[in-house]
Structure formats: structure tokens, C-alpha cells
Amino acid sequence: MNTYKTYLHSMNYMLQWHYHNLGDESVTAMKEILCFGDSNTYGLIPGTKDRYPSEVRWTGILAERVREKNYLVSEEG
């Protein structure tokens, strides 16, 4: 499995957990999810100093999925 597919596969479990454990959808106040971590949170491309694009990083995917539920995702990797 190439590096990109391995990255996406390993982050899929984390995304599923976060997405399904957000709580009550009827809450209208904006809530923030702070993602504080390591190179996975940062989206580091192995062997480089570059990052994956936001739409590829697990934090970016999470942000897109939860935006309609009034959640803001902050990346601090």
C-alpha cells in the first residue's frame, strides 16, 4: 500500500469516531474541536517537509463533515 493510501486508511478510524460522537445535533451554538497532536495531525507527507492539502488531511475532512453541525475544527499539530 502506498504512503498516501496508508495515511488515509489509518485516519479513517479516527474520523469515524469523531463524526459519530459529536452529541446532540440540535445544539446551535458553535463548538470547537481542537486537534492537537503530531505529524498525523499536521498532515506531514513522509520524507518531506510538505503537508497534505487540507481536503486530504483527516482534520480537514473532519472539519468539512462537522461544519453543518456547528463545529469548528482547529488544527494544532
Image (cartoon, helix red, strand yellow):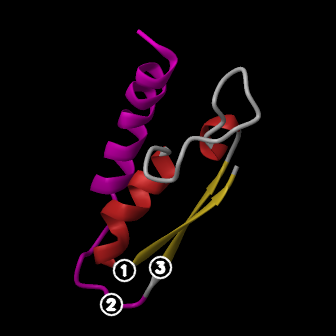
Could you tell me the amino acid type at mark 3? Lys
Could you tell me the amino acid type at mark 2? Thr
Disc 3 marks which residue? 31
The secondary structure that most of the magenta stretch takes on is helix
Could you tell me the amino acid type at mark 1? Asn
Real-space CA distance between mark 2 and mark 1, rounded to the nearest whole angstrom: 6 Å
The reply to whether dot 2 and dot 1 touch (C-beta < 8 Å) is yes
Taking the magenta stretch, the answer to whether it contains residue 19 is: yes
Which structural element holds mark 1?
A: loop
Disc 2 marks which residue? 28
Mark 2 and mark 1 lie on one chain; the one further toward the N terminus is: 2
Residue found at the very far right of the displayed protein:
49
- Percent position (x, y) of residue 54? 51, 53
Disc 1 marks which residue? 70
Residue beneath the point at 61% across and 36% down: 40
**Crowdedness of circle 3 by 10 Å Cα count: few (<14), some, many (20+)?**
some
Residue 18 higher or lower than 14, as above or below: below
Mark 3 and mark 1 lie on one chain; the one further toward the N terminus is: 3
Residue found at the very far bottom of the displayed protein:
29
Residue 64 higher or lower than 56, as above or below: below
Residue segment shown in magenta: 1-29
Q: Is residue 51 visible?
A: yes
**On the image, which quarter does residue 44 sit in?**
top right
Taking the magenta stretch, the answer to whether it contains residue 10 is: yes
Is 76 on the left-hand or right-hand side of 68?
right
Residue beneath the point at 53% across and 48% down: 53
Residue beneath the point at 47% across and 45% down: 58
Real-space CA distance between mark 3 and mark 1, rounded to the nearest whole angstrom: 6 Å
The reply to whether dot 3 and dot 1 touch (C-beta < 8 Å) is yes
